[in-house]
Image: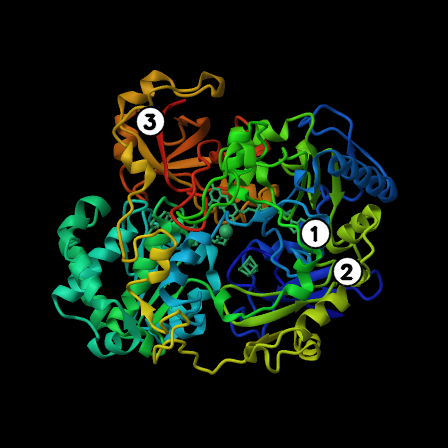
Amino acid sequence: MIITGVCPHDCPDTCSWQVKVDPIDGRALDIWGHPDHPVTQGRLCGKVDRYLERTYHPDRLTAPLKRVGRKGEGRFQTIGWDQAIAEITDRLKAIIAEYGAEAVLPYSYAGTMGVLQGEGMAARFFNRMGASQLARTICSEAGFEGYQYTTGRVIGMEPQDFAHARLILLWGTNTLTSNMHLWPFVQQARKKGARVIVIDPARTRTARAADEWIPIWPGTDAALALAMMQALIAEDRIDHEYIAKATVGFEKLVERVRQFPPEWAESITGIPAERIRELARVYAETQPAAIRVNYGLQRHAGGGMAMRNIVILPALVGAWRYRGGGVQLSSSGSFYLDKSALKRPDLLGDRHPRTINMIRLGDALSLDPTRLARAHYHPRPIDPIPSPEEAGPPVKALIVYNSNPAAVAPDQAAVTAGLLREDLFTVVLEHFQTDTADYADYVLPATTQLEHWDILKPYGHLFLALNRPAIAPIGQALPNSEIFRRLAAGMGYEDPCFREDDETILRNFIQAQTHPTFEGVTWKRLLAEGFVRLNLPEPYLPFAEGHFPTPSGKCELFSQRMADDGYDPLPAWIPPAAFKSRTQNPQRLDDSRSSCETSAFEHPPLMLISPPAHSFLNTTFANMARFQAREIEPMVWLHPQDAAERGVIDRDVVCICNEQGRVQLVARVTEDIMPGVALAPTIWWRKFSPDERNVNWLTDQHETDMGGTAAFYDVRVWLTKG
Ligand SMILES: Nc1nc2c(c(=O)[nH]1)N[C@H]1C(S)=C(S)[C@@H](COP(=O)(O)OP(=O)(O)OC[C@H]3O[C@@H](n4cnc5c(=O)[nH]c(N)nc54)[C@H](O)[C@@H]3O)O[C@H]1N2
Ligand SMILES: Nc1nc2c(c(=O)[nH]1)N[C@H]1C(S)=C(S)[C@@H](COP(=O)(O)OP(=O)(O)OC[C@H]3O[C@@H](n4cnc5c(=O)[nH]c(N)nc54)[C@H](O)[C@@H]3O)O[C@H]1N2
Ligand code: SF4
Ligand SMILES: [Mo]
């Protein structure tokens, strides 16, 4: 028996898969990439190839658990579902009676990207309750905003069209690790003579496989793009006709970029001015030119602006005109999804609960109203931070699903202090006993993608996909949808939407889509075919003739909306936060976080970036011995020069520290990283790390310029032999 499904993970490829199931005992025997899917092309990545191993893993949670030890100790006893639901909902009712529903905070991200097991039933539940809302900003909002201000929506090239490019810039992305199904199209283009250039502080496996690697200082891509604009305009290598037809604000842009020649950018980016000029020249002359830009470069203070500046480049050279030209960040904007019937915001009635920014979980869990107020979502400069009096009730209950905040959220010390609060009631829905589950009062076992229904909206291509369950749930695990259904019943919520079954929810969701791009995308076809492309022309050249979905209908080089929202309306340079203080030693370090040895300050600080390890998917898979072995150990890449200065040799234990605290890692001395930069592949589980901390002990809660995203790669650290 072969069942078609789709990978649930937070990855642009959203691969469709097939699972072979034993018809007698119902056990899944094998899994592989769907051979007919134009992007999956029959292949899964090395992680999900082992999805059966993860699903049947002996450490899977198979029954509800109730805490018996101290908070965070990780000691639990097994209880039945009915008891768990009754006790949890009793506690929630008491909290709501005393503090109001805003004292309950949901915390979720992209453990599954499914519309149903993600926010489907959960959103209904929290809307009905009137709980605090969560701004899901941890990954991509900055880049999204910068892109949207410029082009209207996050719409770009279809990955298959990279095969038609003659030049490919892989900009702030590690394709072979985080988006491997783009690579075959890159290779097709190369066979026809295309040149591939990687712009990254690290010589990643993608950079090694490319034609050229341009090392760049973290957080300085905005400056590189500005200098490229200046060079393109100064050397008149621009597409005047496209600019006249499809953009607004060109004259103002010309004026603006005059101050940003390549010579200016050289000292900021670390890229020689002549190299920047040559890059601009090649970019203009080699059409179609494709840019794959990804989220790595927007995890910095000026990440939104950096994305905006880059997205202007194809409009200047007219790359959007051609098949194989333009930019791809995400395909999300191509999906005009109506989720109101799914998430039921109407259940809020006239209540307007506060919205908490997920990256400030540390502040949100604080009992200090000043910090709680800071955790309110304020994505734009014009959004005020409330006063402490307006902060609202303390968070008294935290319900975590599809996320592992104890390991993935910035400012780990603050998050940990919050999770350790005796008066905080924490419920975690999980597959495994994660770092976060260790702090729970109740842990509820959830099903994996092999065990439940869902629909996946990809962010790297245009094929909507259906997931059918292939096997029965392991142990007593339940889908998130069913857990929230039971919690709703326990709370006494009577709306009929809390009784809909999963298939009905999904069918109704598809039927509720009215946008023309969903014409022909039917429930029936999804059931029969497994994945269906949006009703968009092939080839899909969204901006060949302009028609940008902005207020002006043009690509907005000048953006009035940005001005209105409190931003510079023109492309600008916002330095990384870590730059400003690069030469300063911290005035005061908090001893309670057992911070740096003073000897650390004898050498200049390093910029710390912590992109995904190849064999993990965020923290998912990072508890499996097979993948831990492939990543060897929690490590940090150091340039030989930086290592020698600090007397560090390969495999030495090192201590990395800053105002946030300190973390122990093992040095990997390599020329694959720029001097001055340290790279720690992650996200390791804390309990598998030497001092039970991972690099997020060193990241902080500061927001990026746009969208309130975490500036995970904008970190300054000192490093000593440990
Ligand atoms: N195997 C694997 N795949 C994944 C993930 C995973 O954990 N593992 N995570 C998934 C998720 S959630 C996401 S959001 C995506 C992330 O995937 P990407 O968007 O590709 O982002 P990152 O891996 O964060 O960073 C990509 C590259 O950017 C570089 N970089 C860091 N800072 C800068 C900078 O300032 N400028 C430039 N030019 N480059 C910089 C890093 O060195 C890294 O090589 O991948 C998804 N896919
Ligand atoms: N230092 C540093 N920190 C980072 C990043 C970085 O590059 N560096 N990357 C950031 C980015 S881009 C992201 S997107 C975030 C990722 O943050 P998260 O989305 O929290 O990512 P995961 O670690 O994959 O955690 C997902 C959890 O959901 C669980 N899960 C999966 N499916 C289900 C399900 O159906 N039901 C339930 N109940 N649980 C399920 C998994 O077992 C897993 O423990 O991390 C961010 N943190
Ligand atoms: S993680 Fe990404 S590459 Fe791997 S199977 Fe899932 S969608 Fe495909
Ligand atoms: Mo992400």
Report if residue 412 is visible in the image. no
- Amino acid type, label 3: Val
Tell me the tag on residue 471.
Answer: 2
For ligand 1, tell me if the residue under mark 3 lies within 8 Å. no
Chain-order first, disc 3 or disc 2: 2
Mark 2 is on which residue type?
Ile
Viewer-side residue, 212 vs 127? 127
Q: Is residue 561 left or right of residue 225?
A: right
User: In this rendering, which labeled residue sits more in front, label 3 or label 2?
Assistant: 2
Numbered tag placed on residue 203 in the rendering = none
Mark 3 sits on what residue?
A: 648
Pointer 2 with pointer 1, Cβ within 8 A: yes
The alpha-carbon separation of the residues under discs 1 and 3 comes to 41 Å
Which residue corresponds to the image point at 45% horizontal and 43% vertical from the top-left?
384
Q: Quadrant of ligand 3?
A: bottom right
| Count of marks overlaid on the render | 3
Q: Is mark 1 within 8 Å of ligand 2?
A: no
Name the residue carrying label 1.
55
- Callout in the foreground (1, 3): 1
When the figure is inspected, residue 289 is found, relative to residue 583, above or below; the finding is below
Q: Is residue 485 visible?
A: yes
Q: Nearer the viewer, residue 348 or 260?
A: 348
Which of the two labelled residues, at mark 2 and mark 1, occupies the earlier sequence position? 1
Q: What secondary structure is marked by label 1? A: helix
